[in-house]
């Protein structure tokens, strides 16, 4: 997790051992981290990115309540940004 107070945003990332994939652990963990951020850090937004081909990671973000946003001008198109 990386906070940018000057921009009032938090960017989070995650990795999960393959043996735990598909168990529902990561969406729950991401939801709790997002809740923590808004309750304790008071950012305007929480962001995460994944490689566009990594649909499982994008699905984790969706399950956690995040929504897809089109890349900003000049952004790498290999990553799919998501924010809440």
Image (tube, rainbow, N blue to C red):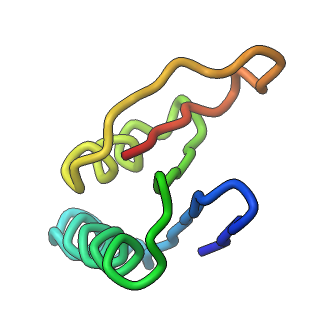
State the image quarter where residue 58 is shown: top left
Q: Quadrant of the N terminus?
A: bottom right
Q: Position of residue 60 (x, y in %)?
A: 30, 53
State the image quarter where residue 6 is shown: bottom right
68 left or right of 59 in image: right
Q: Position of residue 17 (x, y in %)?
A: 44, 78
Could you say which is closer to the camera, residue 30 or residue 36?
36
State the image quarter where residue 37 is shown: bottom left
Could you say which is closer to the camera, residue 67 or residue 60?
67
User: Which residue is found at the position 64% from the left and 33% from the top?
Assistant: 79
Q: Position of residue 52 (x, y in %)?
A: 55, 30
- The number of numbered discs placed on residues in the rendered structure image is 0
User: Which residue is found at the position 19% from the left and 50% from the top?
Assistant: 63
Asked if 20 appears above or below 58 in the picture, the reply is below
Could you say which is closer to the camera, residue 34 or residue 42?
42
Asked if 64 appears above or below 72 in the picture, the reply is below
User: Which residue is found at the position 55% from the left and 35% from the top?
Assistant: 81
Q: Position of residue 65 (x, y in %)?
A: 22, 49
User: Which residue is found at the position 56% from the left and 45% from the top?
Assistant: 49
């Amino acid at each position: 997790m990386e906070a940018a107070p000057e921009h009032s945003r938090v960017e989070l990332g995650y990795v999960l051992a393959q043996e735990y994939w598909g168990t529902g652990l990561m969406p729950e963990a991401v939801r709790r981290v997002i809740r923590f951020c808004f309750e304790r850090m008071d950012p305007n937004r929480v962001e995460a990115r994944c490689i566009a081909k990594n649909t499982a990671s994008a699905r984790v973000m969706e399950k956690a309540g995040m929504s897809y946003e089109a890349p900003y001008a000049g952004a790498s198109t290999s990553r799919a940004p998501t924010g809440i």
